[in-house]
Amino acid sequence: MTEMRRVTAIRNGTVIDHIPSGYALQVIKMLRMDVKRSTPVSLVMNVPSDKIGRKDVLKIEDRELNQEELDRLALIAPEASIAIIRNHVVSGKMKVELSGELYNIASCSFSNCITKADREPLPQRMKIVNENPLEIRCYYCGKRQTLEELIENII
Ligand SMILES: [Zn+2]
């Protein structure tokens, strides 16, 4: 598990706010912080929120996430607001954007998909067919992917 410390403020790093309640661990997984365990992460869950009812908040120390990393979160935390902290001060704010395609974020769940063939590695591409309700399909084989499958198959 990622090291978690409940703290109120960080000196340098990234704060991800307005994560839907209960999804903070999936966010950690999507950012691959469950495998790269060197980054201290503080987790606050079930905080009351005017915007989304209840929310989770993550504070990631000594790392500034870039837009590409943040866009990975669009699937599970489209309302997330991000603050970059430098020397205890907010130095930048960012939003998560759900674009028309997920590029190299998760692999296809269909075992006979062409992306499973080893000879010529293809990038993993998922088309966002519809945002609400969410419908995501593999660019190659067209198989629909559930959110659970996508989280499970993060690369
Ligand atoms: Zn596929």
Image (cartoon, helix red, strand yellow):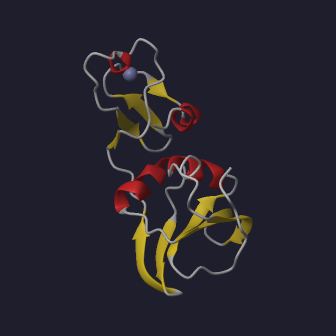
Q: In front: 54, or 33?
A: 33
Please state the total of marks drawn on the protein image.
0
- Rendering coords of residue 99 (x, y %): 33, 49
Question: Looking at the image, is 29 positioned above or below residue 7?
Answer: above
Q: Position of residue 140 (x, y in %)?
A: 31, 22
- The one of 5 and 17 positioned closer to us in this rendering: 5
- Residue at the spot x=51%, y=79% of the render? 12
Please provide percent x and percent y for residue 101: 33, 41
Q: Quadrant of the C terminus?
A: top left
Describe residue 27's horizontal placement relative to residue 47 as left or right.
left
Q: Position of residue 27 (x, y in %)?
A: 57, 52
Residue 14 drawn above or below residue 78: below
Which quadrant of the structure image shows residue 100?
top left
Q: Can residue 23 be seen?
A: no
Residue at 43% over, 69% down: 64
Quadrant for residue 2, please give it. Answer: bottom right
Q: Residue furthest front?
A: 38
Is residue 80 in view? yes
Q: Residue furthest top?
A: 112
Q: Nearer the viewer, residue 99 or 130?
A: 99
Vertical arrangement, residue 62 with respect to residue 41, above or below:
below
Give the residue drawn at x 36%, y 39%.
104
Where ligand 1 lies, by image quadrant? top left
Q: Quadrant of residue 119?
A: top left
